[in-house]
Image (cartoon, helix red, strand yellow):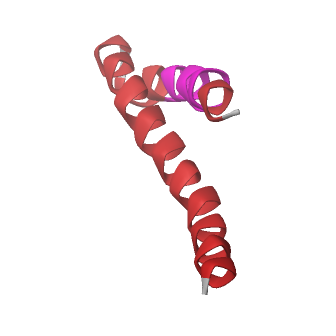
Amino acid sequence: MLSMLRKGGLDVPFMFLLDRLAGADAIAWATPIADCGAMLAGILLFVPLWRKMGKEIN
């Protein structure tokens, strides 16, 4: 799910957006931005699970 979010959901749209805003040279920045967005989404999904697991152990 996160891989699809990264490549299809964030990377490609950021490529088009950065091309419009800053030209073709900025397209290379789309991948690191998409990676950071996918990492943030992963953290947001993981933290509630981690808290739930901690409560079940105690």
Q: Does 47 appear above or below 27?
A: below
Magenta extent: 6-17
- Name the residue located 41 percent from the left edge and 24 percent from the top edge: 31
The residue at 51%/57% (across/down) is 43
Q: Nearer the viewer, residue 56 or 37?
A: 56
Residue 11 sits inside the magenta stretch: yes
Q: Is residue 8 magenta?
A: yes
Q: Examine the image and state in which quarter residue 5 appears.
A: top right
Residue 32, placed above or below residue 19: below
**Left or right position of 6 against 32:** right
The front one of 1 and 19 is: 1
Give the image location of residue 50, x and y in percent: 58, 68
Residue 32, quarter of picture:
top left
Determine whether 2 is above or below 40 in the image: above
Q: Residue at x 60, y 87 (%)?
A: 58
Asked whether, in this view, residue 9 is left or right of residue 50, the answer is right
Residue at the spot x=58%, y=21% of the render?
7
The percent coordinates of residue 23 (x first, y second) are 36, 18
